[in-house]
Image: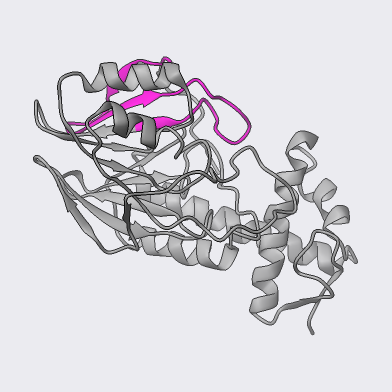
Amino acid sequence: MQFIKAFDFAYGRCDRISPLVERVIANNPGPFTFTGTGTYIVGRGDGAVAVIDPGPADEAHLDALLGAIGYRKVSHILVTHTHADHAPLSRPLSNACGKPPIYAAAPPERSGESVRLDEADDEAFSPDVIIRGGETIEGDGWTIEVMATPGHASNHMCFVLAEENGLLSGDHIMGWSTTIVAPPDGDMSDYMASLEAVMARDFHIVWPTHGAPITDVEPFLKGYHAHRMAREEQIIERLKAGDTTIERMVPVLYATVSQSLWPAASLSVLSHLIKLAREGRAVTDDENSLSGRWSLIG
């Protein structure tokens, strides 16, 4: 899998990356955010714009966004999902821009995570308009289709920019890394189905919230899918080798990855194992924790 690690950016700088799309990156780099949250501004000329994934609660990023928007009207604020690196700045941005409505899926039901990740939910987030997928949002010279893509999060949405056949993919697809799928809210079965739905659309370009645009879309997505399926096969091989716990699997499967990322990797392995159990290919004494014991069926 050839990931895209290098691209030109500067924190707070507004870059035009397509005829209808600009991007401003927040200074919140990390193991799950890469160089930081990329907030997208969609619009044409002096017309009203939509802002996608305003980002974390960061005054400097808010100032940068307001500078990039300038005198233009903000008609819509769209949020791909409620994680804390995407959603918190939505309300401050709305308040600063005349209170345009915030569109997002309903926040997920709260349930304790086995391991708390940096991208845990913004529990204070509350959208003005609930979206469920399939809606069309029209603006000043642009049209966005809402595409439900659960998996990374149960309430994850992508946004299709019709005029450019492009996908604002949030965390569903990222050029720099595979996406974390962490139970209980993340679901690998849902993720793979959503990924295949995106692959079927034949997009010309994908704009992730973290990292560079993906321009060679078809081979990249095929590689993304193959990478996931290869990981699943590796997990099956560990089960065949007698590794019955995630604790035993992760050091082998992620031997070349920093141990600081092993807690997240453990959740990803759990998500794959839950998928295998749903398919009738594996069984466990406890699928709701990282300490369950697993074995293959047959």
Residue 31 lies in the magenta-colored region: yes
Image quadrant for the N terminus?
A: top right
Q: Nearer the viewer, residue 170 or 96?
A: 96
Q: Is residue 70 visible?
A: yes
Quarter location, residue 116? top right
> Measured along the vertical axis of the image, is residue 16 above or below residue 287?
above
Which quarter of the figure has residue 48? top left
Residue 262 relative to residue 34: left or right? right
Query: Is 215 placed above or below 64 here?
Result: below
Establish if 148 lies above or below 140. Answer: below
Tell me where residue 282 appears, x and y as whole percent.
Answer: 75, 76
Q: Is residue 212 visible?
A: no
Q: Picture coordinates of residue 86 (x, y %)?
A: 46, 38
**Camera-nearest residue between 126 and 243:** 126
The residue drawn where x is 42% and y is 48% is: 126
Q: Is residue 65 left or right of residue 56?
A: left
Question: Where does the image place residue 37, in percent across and percent down from the top left?
Answer: 46, 30
Instruction: Give, as a single range, the part of the protein colored magenta.
Output: 10-39
Q: Residue at x 59, y 59 (%)?
A: 185
Quadrant the C terminus occupies: bottom right
